[in-house]
Amino acid sequence: MRTCLYLGEALASYGFGEGHPFGPDRLAAFEAAFYRKGLDRQVEIHAPVRGDRSLLALFHDSRYLDFLERKSRQGTGFLDGGDTPVFPGIWEASLVVAGTVCAAADALLEGECRCAFVPIAGLHHARRDGAAGFCAINDCGIVIEYLRRQAGIPRIGYVDIDAHHGDGVFYAFEEDPGVIVVDFHEDGRFLYPGTGAVSETGRGKAAGTKLNVPLPPSADDERFARLWPAALSFLERHRLRFLLLQAGADSIAGDPITHLALSPATHAMVARSLAGLGLPLLILGGGGYNRDNLARAWTAALEAVSRLPDLKKAD
């Protein structure tokens, strides 16, 4: 079994125009580095897949989906208070992101590949009832619901190393003991969305199933590496059946809108560690607004999982 990469111009359609931090050129930056490093000889390339409204409805409220579809036709304005602009076709682009992520989950469950990577995905801020932080939809939440409802998977691990706290995922499943969350992010006192305190560990029956690891500005690989073993042990204790990694590259030093100082070596280390657990692993690109950074971080993660010779079998 090989690592699967989902690549194609349809994924680049989710972008807010040239000059925007989340522009369509992000995919091209990754793709150029991918071929330059010869990774096409190590992974199996799949085309993007367009989903339908029923996929989005697994996570999002019907009233919000009506609003998103209507705004997409209008092609102007914002989906929220000003962070997430509308562009003509944002509905169709969202369907491609959701459909591709769920197709990648299917490929993993069917044993077609051992790890899968979708670069333009990991839109972790959108709420069930609205957009936020460049995220018109929340494909992370969608695929979690897809795995739970369609495949009956009882316990799913969600790991997020984007500089921003994955609030849209965290609070959607804050009371769900079947979704185990580990979220490394820049401390919310310094960065949007201002959430993700250490004290937030889940609520009700889910208390103790969520781990927030806020990092101070300028936190580097060494600091991350000291904290990672405890996070990995946390995941292992919960006897998971599927893993998601939101591999946002805005945690790399030099990102224009964040303040962490990781290097692509951390992304490779995290991806390698998670793949070594022997579970289906779906990696989603997430944020990252320095094009060189995202290209280096995502190819490092992809190379790390594609070179693993054997994975230990999960219990």
Image: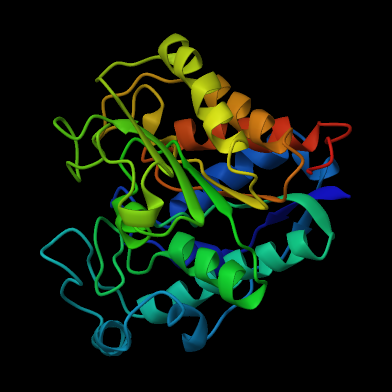
Residue for point 38% across, 55% down: 205
Which residue shows up at 36% across the image and 40% down it? Answer: 289
Q: Give the quadrant of the C terminus.
A: top right
Residue 174 appears in the picture as rendered? no
* Residue situated in front as seen by the camera: 197 or 50: 197
Measured as percent of width and height from the top left, residue 299 is found at 63, 35
Can residue 11 be seen in this snapshot? yes
User: Residue 4, how many percent across, how many down?
Assistant: 75, 53
Q: How many marks?
A: 0
Q: Is residue 198 left or right of residue 139?
A: left
Could you say where residue 127 lies in the image, as x and y percent from the top left? Answer: 29, 66
Q: Horizontally, is 76 left or right of 94 in the view? A: left
| Residue 2 place in picture, x, y as percent | 84, 48
In this view, which residue lies farthest toward the front? 205
Closer to the camera, 175 or 130?
A: 175
Up-down relation of residue 270 to residue 164 (above or below) = above
Position of residue 24 relative to residue 80, above or below, is above
Identified at 57% across, 20% down, the residue is: 265
Q: Residue at x 26, y 67 (%)?
A: 131
Q: Residue furthest top?
A: 222
- Figure coloring: rainbow
Residue 205 higher or lower than 187, as above or below? below
Q: Quadrant of residue 35?
A: top right
Quadrant position of residue 134: bottom left
Q: Is residue 258 left or right of residue 11?
A: left
**Toward the viewer: 235 or 68?**
235
